[in-house]
Amino acid sequence: MTKPRYDEKEDKSRHAAADEDCCEEMAEKYGWRLVDTEKTGNDILPVDCVFDGKTEFPESYYETNTD
C-alpha cells in the first residue's frame, strides 16, 4: 500500500519520480529539503521523494489565469 502524499504524523511529503536524481532536482528547484527516497514498486515512477514538511507544487499559469 502506498503512503499518503503528506503524512501529518511524520510531517513529511512524498512525490513520485522517475529516479533519485529527479528527487534532487525537485528539491533544488522548489527549495524543499529532501530527507529520503523510497522504492514504490511502480514501474513508471519507481521512486518516492520524501521531503520535510508539507510541500505542494505551485499552481500553473493555466490554473491561475482567469481570462
Image: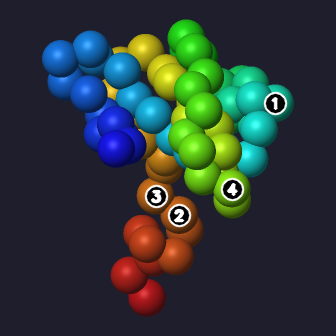
The mark found on residue 43 in the picture is 4
Quadrant containing the N terminus in the rendered view: top left
| Picture residue at 34% right of the left edge, 37% below the top | 3
Instruction: State if disc 4 and disc 3 touch (CB < 8 Å).
Output: no
Q: Secondary structure at mark 4?
A: loop
Label 1, on which residue? Answer: 21
Of callouts 4 and 1, which one flags the residue occurring earlier in the amino acid sequence? 1
Q: Relative to residue 61, is residue 46 depicted above or below?
A: above
Quadrant containing the C terminus in the rendered view: bottom left
Label 1 environment density (alpha carbons within 10 Å; few <14, some 14–19, many ≥20): few
| Picture residue at 28% right of the left edge, 17% below the top | 11
Label 3, on which residue? Answer: 59
**Depth order, front residue of 49/39:** 39
Of callouts 3 and 4, which one flags the residue occurring earlier in the amino acid sequence? 4
Residue 35, image quadrant: top right
Judge depth for marks 3 and 4 and give the one in front.
Answer: 4
User: Horizontal and vertical percent for residue 58?
Assistant: 48, 49
**Depth order, front residue of 20/66:** 20
Q: Kindly report the distance in space between the C-alpha atoms of the residues bearing marks 1 and 2.
A: 23 Å
Instruction: State if disc 2 and disc 3 touch (CB < 8 Å).
Output: yes
**Depth order, front residue of 44/26:** 44
Confirm whether residue 25 shows in the render. Answer: no
Of callouts 1 and 2, which one flags the residue occurring earlier in the amino acid sequence? 1
